Image (spheres, rainbow, N blue to C red):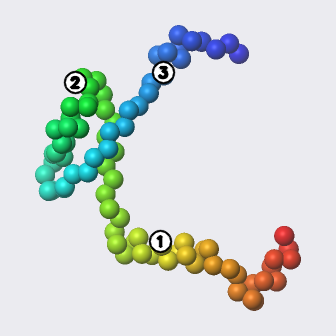
Amino acid sequence: MEFDLAAWARYSFHMNAVEFTTDLSGAAVLPIPREIAAQLPKSGKARIIVLTNEDTDEAQWRAGAYEQFLRDDSAEDAVYESLR
């Protein structure tokens, strides 16, 4: 199979990430700090990803589940080690 450089050029792109935090106020618009806006291109498309803090209860549950997962097996379950 031959590699088509012209087709590759049409689909190739690179991304520049700009990260900042902002306060959510319930409005439909997210404020972008001036110094961040100055780094953005004046035209084109942008992909926006919004990450928010996890629910505290869920974060605690995940941390507890991960801690449990990392624990050694109990003495009763040690019999399964010989089956590897």
Residue type at numbered disc 3: Tyr
**Image quadrant occupied by the N terminus:** top right
The residues bearing labels 3 and 1 have C-alpha atoms spaced at a distance of 39 Å
**Numbered circle sitting on residue 42:** 2
Dot 2 and dot 1 residues touching (CB under 8 Å):
no
The residues bearing labels 2 and 1 have C-alpha atoms spaced at a distance of 41 Å
Secondary structure, mark 1, is: helix
Q: Specify few, some or many for label 3: CA neighbours under 10 Å numbering under 14, 14-19, or 20 or more.
A: few
Answer with left or right where residue 4 lies relative to residue 60: right
- The percent coordinates of residue 79 (x first, y second) are 82, 83
Image mark count: 3
Point 45% across, 75% down: residue: 61
Disc 2 versus disc 1: nearer the observer: 2
**Numbered circle sitting on residue 80:** none
**Numbered circle sitting on residue 62:** 1
Q: Who comes first in sequence, dot 2 or dot 1?
A: 2
Residue type at numbered disc 1: Arg
Disc 3 versus disc 1: nearer the observer: 1
**Image quadrant occupied by the C terminus:** bottom right
Point 41% across, 31% down: residue: 15
**Numbered circle sitting on residue 11:** 3
